[in-house]
Amino acid sequence: MGLDRVDAGDMGRAGAATQTDAHADAATLDALIVGAGFSGLYQLHCLRDRLGLKVQVVEAADGVGGTWYWNRYPGARCDSESHSYCYTFSEDLYRSWEWSERYPGHDEIRRYLNFVADRLDLRRDIRFGTRVVAAVYDQDNNLWRVTTANGVMLSAKFLIAAVGCLSTANVPQIQGLDRFKGQWFHTGEWPHAGVDFRGKRVGLIGTGSTGIQAAPVIAESAAHLTVFQRTANYSVPAQNAPLSETFRRDIKERRSEVRATTHAANNGHSFLIENRSVFDVTVEEREAIFETAWQRGGLQFRANFNDILLTREANETAASFIRTKIRTIVRDPKTAELLADIDHPYAAKRPPIDTGYFETFNRDNVVLVDVRANPIEAIVPDGVQTRDAVYDLDIIVFATGFDAMTGPLLRMNIRGRDGLALSKVWEAGPQNYLGLQVAGFPNFFTVTGPGSPSVLCNMPVPIEQHAEWITDCIRYMRDHKFETIEARPQAMVSWVSEVNAAANATLLPQAHHSWYLGANVPGKPRVFMPYAGGMPRYRQICDDVAAKGYEGFELRR
Ligand code: NAP
C-alpha cells in the first residue's frame, strides 16, 4: 500500500503528474490529522511514533489545546477529576505531570497539553494557524486533497478529523446584535487577554455547564450581573480543592488501577456506578447517601445508584433532592422557584457541577431573568430587550453552547467518493459506523464523532481508545496490503439503530432541548448523537469488529 515514505521531490513529481496546479507543490502525507487537542496530539504520536508514518496535524489555533485553547472564560474548568482527565497510556507522562487541583482549570489543562506536545516532540509536525476549509477525496489517486483558509494545500492517504465535539460556537441569531453599543463575547471564543468586568453591567445568556461556571466568577468583579435563564438546570457542587501531596503521590503509584477503572466505568470516570437501585434503600438511607454525595461533590453524585438515568421514578429522587437544595440555598423564594423549576430529568442533559452557582443569586448585584416566560426579542444598542423589559448592559456574555459534534465536521466541507458531500449524507442527522467512518468516505476517520460514546464520557478515555483503534486498523491495512477502508452502508444503518436503541433505553432523549439531540441549533436535525451504551461495551464492539478482520468495513487492495 502507499504508506511507504515519499520524499519531497517524489511527492512534487507525483503531484505534478496527477493533480491540478494548486496541488502541484502539495506535500503528500500518509495521514493528515485535523486538530491539535487531546485527540489530535495522541493520534499524531500513535501514527508517527508507533507506525512510522509521515503525518501532519493542521490546527486553526496558534497553539495546542483544542477546546481548551478557546474556552478561557471566567471559571472554565473541567468537570472530570484531574487525575483521570489526562492521558493514561504512558507511565512516564502520567508520573511526570503534577495536577494542582481536584478539577483542572483551563490554563492548567493547556499547560499540560503543551507539556505533552513537548515531551513527545509533537510540535514539529503541527501546522498552527491553519484552518481546513475543504477536504475532497480524489478517488483516482486514493488521496484526500485538503485546502486550508491560508491557501496551504495538503494531500494525504488518510484523513483523520480530531476536531472535538464542542468546538463550533453557537451564537444565537438575535436581531440587533450588530447595533449593540457595548462589548459581547461567546464563552467558547474568549479573548486571550481576558475581559475586565469591573464597574460593568454584564448580561449572561445561558445556564448550561458554562454559564453555571461563569456566573459566580463574573459576579465577583462586575458591578451588576443579569443572568438570562431559558431552561433551569440542575447543578451539584464541584467541591474543588487543591490536591494534597499524599494524594498526588498515591495516584502516581496507582496509574494502572486508575486506568483500569476508567476502562471499566461506563462514563470513563475514575469511579464506578454503584450496583444498587434507589429503591434498594430506605428513604432515609437514600437522603443520607445523596447528602454525603453532595458534600463530596462532583459528577459522582449520579453514580450512587444504577437507575437514576433509567426510570423517571428513580430519577425523581435525585432531582427532588437537588431542587430542595436549591430552595434551601437561594434566599429569595421567587428566584429559588425559577431556579428549581426544571423541566427535564436530572442528568438527561449534561449535568453541570459548580462552585457557588446557586449562592450567587444571594448577592445584591445579581438578578435572574426568566426568558422562558419573557423571551429575548432583540439586542438593542443599550442591552437586551425581552418581551417585558429592556436590561441596560455594558457587556453581553453568550454562554449559549455549541453546534456540537456535527458542526466542526460539517464546516470542513468534506466530500467523498463521486463528490458526495458529508452535509448531504447527514442532512437528516449524522450516520456512521461505530462513530468512526461514513460510507462513501474511504480512509476518512472521525475521533469521537457522533455515534461514539464521546461526550457521555470522560473524554480522554474514548480519545485514547479511538486513536489506538485507528492506528491498529491502519497497521492491519499495511500488513495486509489494503489500500482503502470504508464503512459498508448496511453497517452504518445497523450502528445508527444501535445508537438510537442505546439512547432510548435511558432517559437521555427526554431532555428535549439538549445539545445531545442537536436541539440547541435552529434547523439542526433532532437526532440523539452520542452512543449511550457505555464505553466498555463500545470498546468490546470495536475490538470484536477488528478481530473479525474489520467486519462491517470494506477493505480494498
Ligand atoms: P449548553 O449546555 O448548550 O447551554 C447553553 C445555554 O444557553 C442553555 O441554557 C440554553 O438554553 C441557553 N441558550 C441558548 N440559546 C439561547 C437563546 N437564544 N436565548 C436564551 N438562552 C439561550 O452549552 P454550554 O453550557 O456551553 O455547555 C456545552 C457543553 O460543554 C456541556 O454540556 C459540557 O459537555 C461542555 N462543558 C464542560 C464543562 C466542564 O467540563 N466543566 C464546562 C462547560 C462546558 P436552553 O437550555 O433553553 O436551550
Image (cartoon, rainbow, N blue to C red):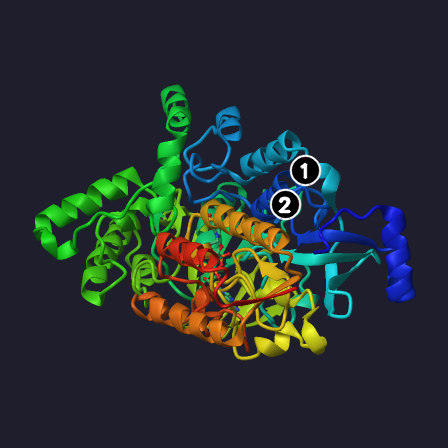
> Can residue 171 be seen in the rendering of this structure?
no
Q: Is residue 435 above or below residue 5?
A: below
Residue at (43, 54) in percent of width and height: 543
Which of 393 and 56 lies nearest the eye of the viewer?
Answer: 56
Which of 9 and 365 lies nearest the eye of the viewer?
Answer: 9
- Estimate how packed mark 1 is, as few (under 14), some (14 to 19) or many (20 or more) residues with alpha carbons within 10 Å: many
From the image, which quarter does the N terminus lie in? bottom right
Q: Position of residue 513 (x, y in %)?
A: 42, 70
The residue type indicated by label 2 comes to: Leu
Apparent side of residue 522 relative to residue 484 in the rendered image (left or right): left
> Can residue 264 be seen in the rendering of this structure?
yes
The residue to which callout 1 is attached is 122
Q: Position of residue 134 (x, y in %)?
A: 74, 65
From the image, which quarter does the C terminus lie in? bottom right
Which of 423 and 464 lies nearest the eye of the viewer?
Answer: 464
Circle 1: element type: loop
The residue to which callout 2 is attached is 47
Q: Position of residue 109 (x, y in %)?
A: 55, 38
Q: Position of residue 224 (x, y in %)?
A: 51, 50
